[in-house]
Image (cartoon, rainbow, N blue to C red):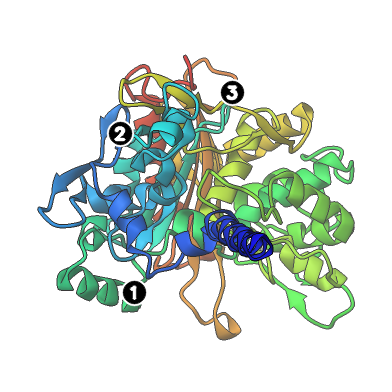
């Protein structure tokens, strides 16, 4: 009898141990699998059982929540949804979350550990804490200026504070209203189908998730490589640059849109945007030097988060000399997001120092206390301060006497670079018009704002002038908005 009892006890112990092992497997090992399973309604129920925290712009919420009376008790609402969609993303009871709504979901839903007043208190008591608020770096005046400037045309705008890396504007056009996707009914399903099938891709965040051939705007990077390497000791001296220029190792000749480019100095070639001069400079710098310079500005970075992930801007690391030449004028396989090109302008305007771009300034709990804040930090030394000074001279000449005069602001020092990128089969697509720029406030030695604008459906008459005609006025409006913003709106974190 005692032996049977012992066997029964041992068997029960094994069963108990198996239950414990399975519990650990379900609750720990496979927790992420179950949490991520679309059939798991508990995640959505927990996310929407109370009002979400808000996303704020200049300390004013651009999101909200309203009761539904259903199992998913609260619905996400948006103020000026199309304007801020490239920042907020969406929070949908059916389709999950995106952009800041996604990366900050723990804060907004109240599950983030840092929101608890006492560490691990909520895990112990199983209490539900109210969602925290996410304060963005966006300047509302700059955001509105960019949105109005695009006026529904397909394109994007990104603006930065060069000294800190704060993102002041992120606009993508055409846009959409995230509130259309908030619910769980037939309307939300229909709107999701319509938006995802729309050929204009209104849900694509073109400012950070779409890369384009940058065209002549990339000549800032090529000029930096030539100056930084010592290939061009004096930007005002004539170069040895034939017009047309035969691409190395080929029988293909590259020409310019206008006259005056043969043996032009870097200064003049940059001002009127000579393709031949910069293609030859890129080929002379060579693949290794061009790759190093592009990467110093942020190209080929697959890990950039703002905190939403940013698409990789590409500069090929394996190319023949003729391909290097074409890449050096922003063609071939060279591509860049608008944010990346804003980073190029920002580094030049900030004396060569490239700061890490960021979109979330701070997070506050239900009481308004700051629980985390972003501190500005350097990403790369893109160029030396001396080279940055030379690049500023080139970019400022573009605005005062070159292809970018439409970006000029009275009393303000503005530097810029126009560009148009050919694309499509045999370059038959409508060229993309680019303008990248920075602006220094009156009496300032460093730029207060850097902007990149791309317009996909621009009407181009002449390649490099189209950037000045279509994109430069948008950049000017954004720069003016930042420079005239009320004190504190664009101040660094913690100031």
Give percent across and percent down for residue 303. Answer: 66, 51
Q: Earlier in the sequence, mark 2 or mark 3?
A: 2
**Residue 102: image tag:** none
Q: Residue at x 71, y 43 (%)?
A: 267
Determine the secondary structure under disc 2.
Answer: loop
Q: Residue at x 46, y 74 (%)?
A: 430
CA neighbours of label 1 inside 10 A, class few (<14), some (14 to 19), many (20+) = few
Residue 239 in view of the camera: no
Determine the secondary structure under disc 1.
Answer: helix
Residue closest to the eye, 88 or 22: 22
CA neighbours of label 2 inside 10 A, class few (<14), some (14 to 19), many (20+) = many
Give percent across and percent down for residue 160. Answer: 50, 37
Residue 124 vs residue 174: left or right?
right
Give percent across and percent down for residue 83. Answer: 28, 49
- Name the image quarter holding residue 388: top right
Nearer the observer, disc 3 or disc 1? 1
Residue identifier under label 1: 196
Determine the secondary structure under disc 3.
Answer: loop
Residue identifier under label 2: 130
CA neighbours of label 3 inside 10 A, class few (<14), some (14 to 19), many (20+) = some
Q: Is residue 459 above or below residue 286?
A: below
Nearer the observer, disc 2 or disc 3? 2
The answer to the question of whether label 2 and label 3 lie on touching residues, with beta carbons closer than 8 A, is: no
Nearer the observer, disc 2 or disc 1? 2
Residue identifier under label 3: 446
Q: Residue at x 37, y 37 (%)?
A: 126
Give percent across and percent down for residue 297. Answer: 70, 45
Q: Residue at x 18, y 57 (%)?
A: 71
Total number of numbered labels?
Answer: 3
Residue closest to the eye, 58 or 463: 58
């Amino acid at each position: 009898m005692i032996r049977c009892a012992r066997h029964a006890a041992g068997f029960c112990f094994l069963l108990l141990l198996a239950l414990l092992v399975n519990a650990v497997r379900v609750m720990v090992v496979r927790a992420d699998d179950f949490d991520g399973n679309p059939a798991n309604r508990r995640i959505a129920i927990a996310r929407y059982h109370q009002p979400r925290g808000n996303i704020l712009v200049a300390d004013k919420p651009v999101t909200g929540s309203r009761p539904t009376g259903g199992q998913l008790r609260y619905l996400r609402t948006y103020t000026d949804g199309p304007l801020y969609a490239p920042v907020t993303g969406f929070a949908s009871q059916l389709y999950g979350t995106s952009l800041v709504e996604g990366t900050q979901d723990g804060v907004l839903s109240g599950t983030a550990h840092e929101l608890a007043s006492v560490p691990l208190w909520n895990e112990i008591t199983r209490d539900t804490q109210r969602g925290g608020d996410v304060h963005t770096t966006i300047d509302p005046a700059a955001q509105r200026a960019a949105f109005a400037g695009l006026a529904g045309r397909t394109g994007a705008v990104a603006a930065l504070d060069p000294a800190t890396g704060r993102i002041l504007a992120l606009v993508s056009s055409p846009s959409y209203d995230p509130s259309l996707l908030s619910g769980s009914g037939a309307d939300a399903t229909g709107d999701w189908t319509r938006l995802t099938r729309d050929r204009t891709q209104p849900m694509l965040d073109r400012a950070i998730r779409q890369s384009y051939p940058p065209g002549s705007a990339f000549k800032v990077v090529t000029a930096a490589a030539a100056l930084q390497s010592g290939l061009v000791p004096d930007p005002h001296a004539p170069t040895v640059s034939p017009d047309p220029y035969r691409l190395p190792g080929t029988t293909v000749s590259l020409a310019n849109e206008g006259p005056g480019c043969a043996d032009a100095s870097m200064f003049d070639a940059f001002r009127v945007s000579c393709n031949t001069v910069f293609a030859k400079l890129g080929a002379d710098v060579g693949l290794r030097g061009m790759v190093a310079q592009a990467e110093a500005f942020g190209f080929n970075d697959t890990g950039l988060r703002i905190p939403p992930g940013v698409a990789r801007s590409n500069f090929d690391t394996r190319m023949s000399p003729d391909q290097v030449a074409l890449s050096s004028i922003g063609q071939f396989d060279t591509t860049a997001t608008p944010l990346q090109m804003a980073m190029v302008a920002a580094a030049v305007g900030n004396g060569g120092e490239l700061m890490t771009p960021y979109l979330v300034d701070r997070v506050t709990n239900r009481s308004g206390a700051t629980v985390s804040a972003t501190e500005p930090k350097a990403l790369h030394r893109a160029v030396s301060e001396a080279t940055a000074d030379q690049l500023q001279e080139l970019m400022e000449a573009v605005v005062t006497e070159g292809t970018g005069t439409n970006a000029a602001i009275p009393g303000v020092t503005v530097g810029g670079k126009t560009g148009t990128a050919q694309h499509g089969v045999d370059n038959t697509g409508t060229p993309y018009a680019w303008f990248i720029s920075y602006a220094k406030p009156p009496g300032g030695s460093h730029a207060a704002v850097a902007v990149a604008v791309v317009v996909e459906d621009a009407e181009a008459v002449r390649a490099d002038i189209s950037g000045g005609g279509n994109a430069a006025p948008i950049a000017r409006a954004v720069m003016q908005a930042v420079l005239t913003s009320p004190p504190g709106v664009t101040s660094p974190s913690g100031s």
